[in-house]
Amino acid sequence: MKTSARIALLAGLALAIALVAREGGTAVLAALEQAGWRLLLLVPLHALPLLLDVLGWRLLIAAPSRVPALFAIATVREAVNRLLPVANIGGDIVGIRLLARRGPGAVVAAASVIVEMLLTVFSQVVFLLLGLACLLALTGALHAGSGRAGGLALGLGLALGLTALLGGLLAALLRRASVFSGIERVAARLVGGRQRLPEIFADSPRLDAAIRCLCARQVRLALAAGWQLLGLVAGTLETWLVLRWLGHPVGIAASVALESLTQAARTFIFLVPAGIGVQEAGLVGIGYLLGIGSELALALSLAKRLREILFGLPALLAWYWMEESRGLDHVRNRSQC
């Protein structure tokens, strides 16, 4: 896994550097200079989509939980997944650990995070479908006789098929008695062995039962998925604002198309740490279809990465401090004994 991640990182870096070199770093920086200090506003703005996601997660926790505490844990989860080479799953494992310490218990914490991860896949496919529909409408691909229309229509058809397939797989997976056992095997491969998984992964029967109980609450599942989808749509405000600040304002539909397709690329090509190169290529490609210059698309990508760093680094530092504090408390307790 480490070797694959390193190869993916090098490939992503090479692609990102090639894209910037082709457009010229000066042009990209000049576009960013036009936005100026306003890019810092993206940091507090990101709290909105994250909060909506937290409201959905709260519905899946079978125990009383406070939104501020969940929001703090969610920032750490996102920061670990976005900024560290953990294949988009390490942050969720950290989230289980942090939530379990808050009182709900390891089984309740793990069940909520696992079910939320499954719902997230479905929500992102629906969001992708919405983005493809916006792209088709904006590019006039619904009109016959366009070669580009055929390609985009095919993409929409594939997305529809993927949505139906994932929906069926998700429903079947949630009804299985041993849903967690399969997830455990996949997680172990991603993190490099079962010994690196949290202790809760050793209690599969209880966790399977908790997941089945949670999945029986279909109304809660639907509401949680709805909050997730609202969070994804709210995240398009970032793209909309940045392009406006860069001097190329676009509508909400174009922002949804850009955001959904690039997020889908980052999610499904999860081996590339931080989606380096994947995000840049996605924004350049979709931006081309929408009449957005490559230098503006790359500037948008850099603005997003700046926000990820400024929003995520404090969360990583807070996580490090929490782990260190817990370690010190453990040492003190042992010395007192």
Image: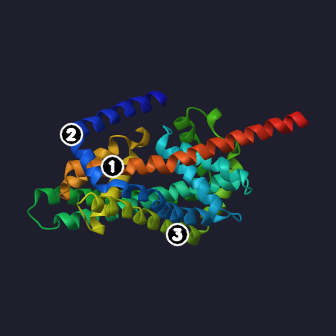
Closer to us: 92 or 324: 324
Closer to us: 180 or 121: 121
Location of residue 125 by image quarter: bottom left
- Label 1 and label 2: CA atoms lie apart by 15 Å
Name the mark nearer the viewer: 1 or 2. Answer: 2
Q: Earlier in the sequence, mark 3 or mark 2?
A: 2
Task: Decide: few, some or many residues near mark 2? Use Cα within 10 Å; few <14, some 14-19, many ≥20.
Answer: few
Report the coloring of the rendering: rainbow
Give the residue pinned by disc 3. 222
Q: In which quarter of the image is the C terminus?
A: top right
Q: Which residue is drawn at 55% across and 58% down?
A: 116
Question: Mark 2 is on which residue type?
Answer: Gly
Does residue 181 appear in the picture of this structure? no
Give the secondary structure at mark 3. helix
Task: Decide: few, some or many residues near mark 1? Use Cα within 10 Å; few <14, some 14-19, many ≥20.
Answer: many
Residue 101 location (% of width, % of height): 72, 51
Q: Which of marks 3 and 1 is nearer the N terminus?
A: 3
Query: Viewed as shown, does residue 160 lie left or right of 235?
Result: left
Closer to us: 63 or 320: 320
Residue 294 location (% of width, % of height): 21, 48
Residue 150 location (% of width, % of height): 16, 58
- Disc 3 + disc 2, Cβ < 8 Å: no
Location of residue 36 by image quarter: bottom left
Q: Earlier in the sequence, mark 1 or mark 2?
A: 2
Rendered view: 298 above or below 86: below
Task: Decide: few, some or many residues near mark 3? Use Cα within 10 Å; few <14, some 14-19, many ≥20.
Answer: few
The extreme right residue here reads: 337
- Label 3 and label 1: CA atoms lie apart by 32 Å
Q: Residue 301 carries which label?
A: 1
Give the residue pinned by disc 2. 24
